[in-house]
Image: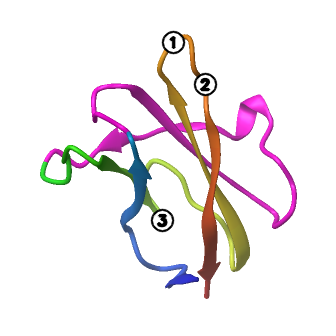
Amino acid sequence: METISSLSREWLPFWIRGAVGSEQVEIAFTVPCVEPVENDWAGAEWDPLSVTAKGATARILFGPGGTTSRPEGTWQAWVRITAPPQLPVLPAGLIDVI
């Protein structure tokens, strides 16, 4: 579980096996055990320094003034990759905002 202060704004990284780093990528945060709905998704990006033959790291600027933020609590992260004809939605771990 990743822990982040509710006052912090920082990149949250998520390693995605098999990604090439050019696909459209989005990240959502939900209550644990709840799947995201369309309005939960926020645009993310690939860390250009992370792309390898095995995959790449998706990231989102999380926190006040970032791309997205959540109040204190535990949140389930999800990554969605648009790579036609595939559209994988991957659970990506828990984030604890304190």
Badge 1 vs badge 2, beta-carbon distance below 8 Å: yes
Camera-nearest residue between 85 and 37? 85
Asked whether residue 66 is in view, the answer is: no
Residue at 61%, 88% in the rendered image: 98
Checking the image for residue 23, the label placed there is none
Instruction: Determine the residue positioned at 81% across, 67% down.
Output: 32
Residue 25 visible in the current orientation: yes
Q: Which residue is mark 3?
A: 63
Depth check, front residue: 75 or 53: 53
Numbered mark located on residue 84 in the image: 1
The answer to whether the residue labelled 1 contacts the one labelled 3, judged by CB atoms less than 8 Å apart, is: no
| Element type at mark 1 | loop
Magenta region: 19-48
Q: Which residue is mark 2?
A: 87
Percent x, y of residue 44 = 42, 40
Is 74 within the magenta? no
**SS type, badge 3:** loop
